[in-house]
Amino acid sequence: MRRFLLSLAILVTLPSAGMADVLGVRSATRGDGIRLVIDLSESSKFRAFELSKPSRVVVDLPKLAWRANALPAKGRGLASIRHGPFRTNAYRLVFDLERAATIESAGLIPGRGSKGKRLVIDLRYGDRPNSKKFGTFEPLENPPPHPPKRTKEWVVMIDAGHGGVDPGTIGVGRVLEKHVNLAVARKVKKLLDSKPGYDVHLTRSKDEFLRLRQRVRLGRESGADLFISIHADAHPDPKVSGASIYTLSEKGSDREAERLARSENAADLIGGAPLEDDNNEVASILIDLAQRETKNQSLAVADDILFALAPTQPLLRSPKRSAGFAVLKAPDVPSVLIELGFLTNRDDARRLSRKKDQDAIASAIATGIIRYFEGANTARSRQDR
Ligand code: ZN
């Protein structure tokens, strides 16, 4: 025994990247202990340690092919052998011992064939505790049960409508739409900025005039995954109130909606230059399949934002609408235009100029955006599509 241990002691275990096969497993009782032998097809890292109550020896090897035909019969110091894949990169063998024993040495010696190795583990009977681990292999922990799904940041462009020389709607109490839009846009950005995984931009962060095409271009150039334009509505009837969401229509079907689109699109005329809108170009883009997918995504965003808005904000009757807004015409960026409410309605005008209500509406919009990006697999109502 003593001579054997000495010979084991001079063996050097070379780390190997190769993944060995297990060709056989044997055990033998040897006077005051047990010898475990694992025949491997080639050199391998390993880890061996013992556990008590019941007494057992654990051997971890890098993930391997199990090619051992027969396991040693019960007896020869063993009660049983169990084995199977362990964690992400390992294979584990557990030797249940008939009597408590402690590992004295563990190492590789030449085995079958030119590359073959034997992992020899010698145990001595006795119950003295030994927390030592033999070998250098470390099984990798399993990945966390819910790995983060996102591999990149979501880029969101938030567009506060109007600005500078273009005030937008001038509402009850001379509430200016451009100021409401910017206040809510900033709040949505701040809320999304506080979440991991969002890269949020504003087309304008101050009271300045931007052409509609400039706004669309800023969205596309930032690589936006989503473009959200924020506006507030006007109506000749002061009783009309509530929020609504628009996606781009292929054709003006709703005259009311088109009237609104004309007034929002007129922003560029106020800025002193004609709208750079080429209808032929837009028409050809609209039949593009990419545009169709963008449109589907835009509808999904509209659903998700409406879903979040509904419990907290008054909504216009049939609040999901479509119109030919120039600012929604990026062919490859899902885009929606939110009309926060009617500044021509006394209640809406008061609500939209109050900080507390702006916070609530911004929070609902941010929740809807998060729902769009992160809630694809969660239950969401699709009945209205
Ligand atoms: Zn507007």
Image: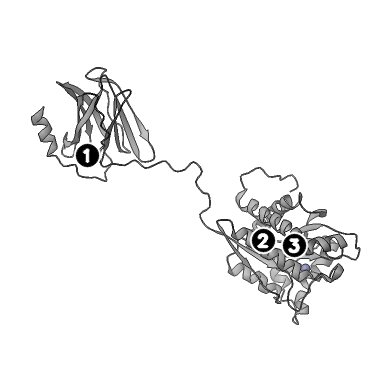
In the image, residue 32 above or below residue 314: above
Residue at the spot of label 2 = 188
Looking at the image, is mark 2 or mark 1 nearer the viewer?
A: 2
Q: Residue 242: name its quadrant.
A: bottom right
Q: Secondary structure at mark 2?
A: helix
Residue at the spot of label 1 = 42
Mark closer to the chain start, 2 or 1 = 1
Mark closer to the chain start, 3 or 1 = 1
Mark closer to the chain start, 2 or 3 = 2
Write the residue at 69% across / 51% down: 304
Cβ of mark 1 under 8 Å from ligand 1: the answer is no
Viewed as shown, does residue 157 lie left or right of 250?
A: left
Q: Is residue 249 visible?
A: no
Write the residue at 16% across / 22% down: 32
Viewed as shown, does residue 112 lie left or right of 184?
A: left
Q: Residue 65: name its quadrant.
A: top left
Q: Tell me if mark 1 has few (under 14), some (14-19) or many (20+) residues whose alpha carbon lies within 10 angstroms of its own.
A: many
Write the residue at 9% across / 29% down: 2
Q: Is residue 230 visible?
A: yes
Q: Quadrant of ligand 1?
A: bottom right
Residue 227: give x, y in percent of width and height. 66, 63
The amino acid marked with disc number 1 is Glu
Residue 121: give x, y in percent of width and height. 20, 31
Q: CA distance from mark 3 to mark 1?
A: 71 Å
Q: Quadrant of the N terminus?
A: top left
Q: Secondary structure at mark 1?
A: loop
Residue at the spot of label 3 = 355
In the image, residue 47 above or below residue 164: above
The amino acid marked with disc number 2 is Val
The amino acid marked with disc number 3 is Lys
